[in-house]
Amino acid sequence: MTPVDDPRHISRGREIPSEGYADQPYVVRTDDGAWLCVMTTGAGREGAAGQHVVSMRSVDHGATWTDRVDVEPADGPEASYAVLLKVPSGRVYCFYNHNTDRVTEVRREDGGVFARVDSLGHYVFKYSDDHGRTWSERRWDVPVREFACDRENVYGGELRFFWNVGRPLITGGAALLTLHKVGAMGEGFFAQSEGVFLRSENILTECDPDRISFETLPDGDVGLRTPPGGGRVAEEQSLTVLSDGSLFCVYRTVDGWPACSYSRDGGHTWSTPEYLTYSPGGRRVKQPRAANFIWRLQRGGFLYWFHNHGGRAARGLPGWNPYDDRNPAWLVAAREIDGPDGKLLEFSQPEIALYDDDTRVRMSYPDLIEEDERLFLTETQKHVGRVHELPAELVAGLLGQWERAEVARTGLALELTDEVPGSVAMPALPPFTARDTSRHDYGTKDLRAGFTVETWLLLERLDAGQALLDSRAEDGRGIALVATERGTVELIMNDGRGECRWDCDRGVLEPGTRQHFAVVVDGGPKVISFVVDGVLCDGGDERQFGWGRFAPHLRDVTGGPALRIGPGVEALRIYTRALRTSEVVGNRRAGR
């Protein structure tokens, strides 16, 4: 197959070897300069017998992997969901679930049973003193304090359920590990969950594993749960530290938004959980039941991985599954701001980081590696794990989004900033597909092209059918921005063979107010997105998605020779490429 010419496409990543099932490929950089990756793998599917933990090393940024060894063997008890902690001596600890007691099934809260036994038992560790080439023969149990959810499970706490996906954190001379306690097995597998933390004051300096101590936090016997009134699921906590020593934790729910909390005392107590917002008291971030991780960057700032859809509008839809739609993966940047009792985080507008052409493929459980100003992401679809280098311009755009104030010039095909006539020559838009003459069957070649239409609007009214822009020929070929009965504006694209359309969120357009309005058509993931006054539409309270997909068979949508421009369009730019969200935000800040 011809390589896809888009660094965001997951096929461009470098594969991390596995035995078939591939989960949580997490990486640390060892003191000899290698990448050490730990992975949960096995010949079967997730949760099947034989699931175990392996490690491997790479000295070429994940292009090849060597020194693959079993941390736990495939013929032993299930071993799963490992994370790595490197301490100042260079020793690397590997923490994971271990079904030491060889439990064969677990009871559900509704009286049924699960045969899957990979999220229970003992939380254990092994260590390596040779940068991951070998691991200690012995494993050590980590003592975890009992919480109310343990006592209240169907076994009365005699058997506990838990797992871990969060990267360990070193702060204040101690190490903090996350653990996701499960109080009930049932609907969705984990029917009730909450987050706790294991703090070790001496693991960074103590060489004797028998003398390493752990304290379970927070104080009391209830972990981080959903905000008041939320659901029972609060899991996969991701932890980072702020410049004032505060801890910030974000985690998934089934409510449609991720939850978050701050600790100002090293994890002993936490603020009342809230749904994550882009700024304090602002718009909620949307997220399904999927990993959403945050990383602090050495260069300053933070990156946050999520999937940018959800909300209450998603619940109850036919076929709705909170685990679905982890494609594409999005990134936002975060920066610190001052709050009433310490630092807080605010977040940029999102960018698509990775995608697959098959919209049902799910990518998740990422890790971030920084090396020589380069950033790499790992991810998995449960079958193939990969390493991806993030484009430098994408990262720079996100981190600089609060300051950027310049008009993007690359790909600019039409610019009207002074007098805007009622009609101009329509610039040629790049076709989305073409005939592939290199193929014997002359089939379709996906050009992964796109375009952007950007306007400054001052609309007197917004009546259904009102056209802002229209390049359509008599047979319908072309593009148009047309007002809908919902009080929105939709993009219509027609190639003479089929038509696709998607509209902005309701309530974002205000007649009588000057507004910046852009629609980005991205031919990589086939996504249409709207950015209004510097904010990417996310569906609001009415829709699960603010961004929509268009058909992959669409061809050329330039339309007729003329572009008709409606009243109220005060400025117009058309680009023959999909602008990044950060570029649209910069265009808006730069003005006309």
Image (cartoon, helix red, strand yellow):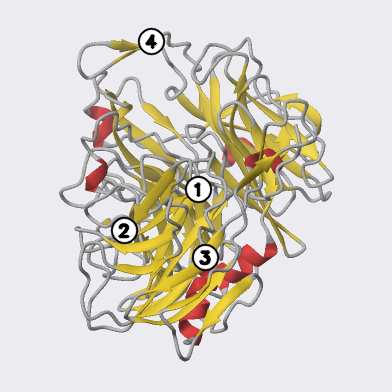
Sort mark 2 into few (<14), some (14-19) or many (20+) by Cα contacts within 10 Å.
many
Q: Is residue 412 above or below residue 150?
A: below
Q: Nearer the viewer, mark 4 or mark 3?
A: 3
User: Quick one: SS at disc 4?
Assistant: loop
Q: Earlier in the sequence, mark 1 or mark 2?
A: 2
Q: Earlier in the sequence, mark 3 or mark 1?
A: 3
Alpha carbon distance from label 4 to label 1 = 55 Å
Alpha carbon distance from label 3 to label 1 = 17 Å
> What amino acid is at disc 3?
Thr
Residue behind mark 3: 452
Disc 1 and disc 2 in contact, CB within 8 angstroms: no
Mark seen at residue 495: 1
> Which residue is most to the left?
229
Pick whichever, 340 or 573, lies toward us: 573
> What amino acid is at disc 4?
Glu
Mark seen at residue 144: none
Which residue is at 71% across, 48% downward?
Answer: 5
Mark seen at residue 105: 4
Q: Nearer the viewer, mark 3 or mark 1?
A: 1
Residue behind mark 2: 270
